Amino acid sequence: MGTAIYGIRRRGPLQLGMTDPYLMCMTEPLVVTIPHKLGRDEAVRRIKSGFGGAKGHFAHLVTISEERWEDSRLTFHASALGQTASGVIDVGETTVLVSVQLSWLLARFANAAAKMIGQQGTLMLEKK
């Protein structure tokens, strides 16, 4: 199967018209959409397996403090570089939507993270 195209959306910091430094440091979520042709159940199975493998592979960089599946939605909390992030992975019949709320420091790495999420997700969801 050829290389899949995935969508990446990232906007700048939230513009709330406030001067509170805490609110100025918040970012909008990093959102990656990954198309697939597996159906929801097979995509969920592969993501569960792949997420477990990724936790071990990237354990020296990222700590997953919470991982909770509800039907076809994974909610997680992670930390890296002393910063925290939380997100959801929504698995649909034809797409997987990954949305991660990053701290301001981790948001600096958002483009690299989005590229890696898209590439690894595409590999995980290719038909075999």
Image (tube, rainbow, N blue to C red):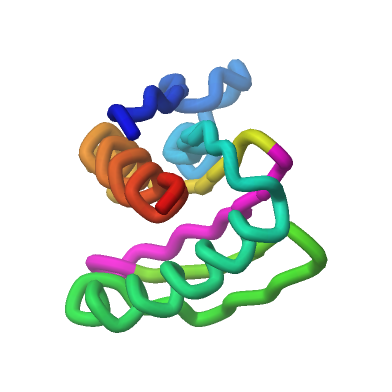
Count of numbered tags:
0
Task: Answer left or right for 42 relative to 26.
Answer: right
Residue nearest the observer in this picture, 53 or 107: 53
Quadrant where the N terminus sits is top left
Query: Against 107, is 28 above or below?
Result: above
Residue nearest the observer in this picture, 37 or 80: 37
Q: Which residue appears farthest toward the right when viewing the image?
A: 71
Return the x and y of residue 84 as percentages of the image width and height: 43, 64
Residue nearest the observer in this picture, 22 or 40: 40
Return the x and y of residue 45 as percentages of the image width and height: 60, 67
Q: Quadrant of residue 95?
A: top right
Residue nearest the observer in this picture, 87 or 104: 87
In magenta segment, residue 8 = no
Return the x and y of residue 126 as percentages of the image width and height: 41, 45
Q: Main secondary structure of the magenta part?
A: strand
State the residue at coordinates (27%, 36%): 115
State the residue at coordinates (50%, 81%): 65
Q: Quadrant of residue 99?
A: top right
Return the x and y of residue 66 as percentages of the image width and height: 57, 79
State the residue at coordinates (30%, 83%): 56
In magenta segment, residue 87 = yes
Query: Against 30, is 46 above or below?
Result: below
Residue stretch in magenta: 80-93
Q: Quadrant of residue 64?
A: bottom left
Task: Answer left or right for 81 relative to 41.
Answer: left
